[in-house]
Amino acid sequence: MEKRYKVVFLGLVKTEDYFKEGMSRLGMSPTEVERMIIEAPVILKEDMTIGIARRFADDIMQAGGKVNIEEYGFFEDDSEKKTRSLKFEPLESFTMCPQCGHKQLKSEQCVKCGLTLSEKT
């Protein structure tokens, strides 16, 4: 499990005009920026890896805002999702067809040539 983070806007470091201009360069509308300033502290973004949270926080700080990165929770690591348990049958569970040589799990009939194996396994 890997930790997740959120970025919290705490207030202004520079002037309000400087901050509004910086945030507009980041694509935020004046209305959203005004709301951020009034409602501080406010969560700007959550459920991020630490790398993404740092980059996001850096952008806000360069625009003149004061932010804090806080733990948000955990998420399942991608490597855990990709790991699958494989079931391996024991060697004695296999047989070889005497007619065609196909190796397979023991069964009544060869899956390749159709020979009846039940009496010969």
Image (cartoon, rainbow, N blue to C red):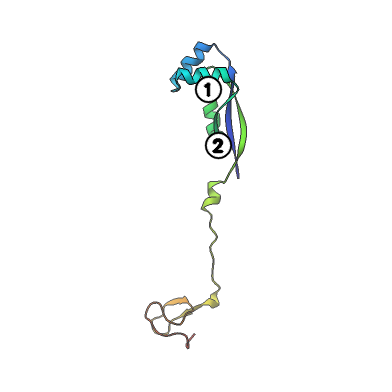
Q: Are marks 1 and 2 in contact (CB under 8 Å)?
A: no
> In the drawing, what numbered circle is on residue 60?
1
Residue 43 on image: x %, y %:
57, 27
Q: Give the farthest residue toward the left.
A: 113
Q: Residue visible at 56% across and 51% down? A: 80
Going by the numbered disc 2, the residue's amino acid type is Thr
Name the quadrant of the N terminus. top right
> In the drawing, what numbered circle is on residue 109?
none
Residue 103 on image: x %, y %:
45, 76
Give the residue pinned by disc 2. Answer: 49
Residue 119 on image: x %, y %:
48, 88
> In terms of image quadrants, where is residue 25?
top left
Q: Residue visible at 52% across and 28% down? A: 56
Q: Secondary structure at mark 1?
A: helix
Residue 75 on image: x %, y %:
57, 43
Q: Residue visible at 62% across and 34% down? A: 71
Q: Secondary structure at mark 2?
A: loop
Q: Label 1 vs label 2: CA separation? A: 17 Å
How many numbered badges does the structure rendering display?
2
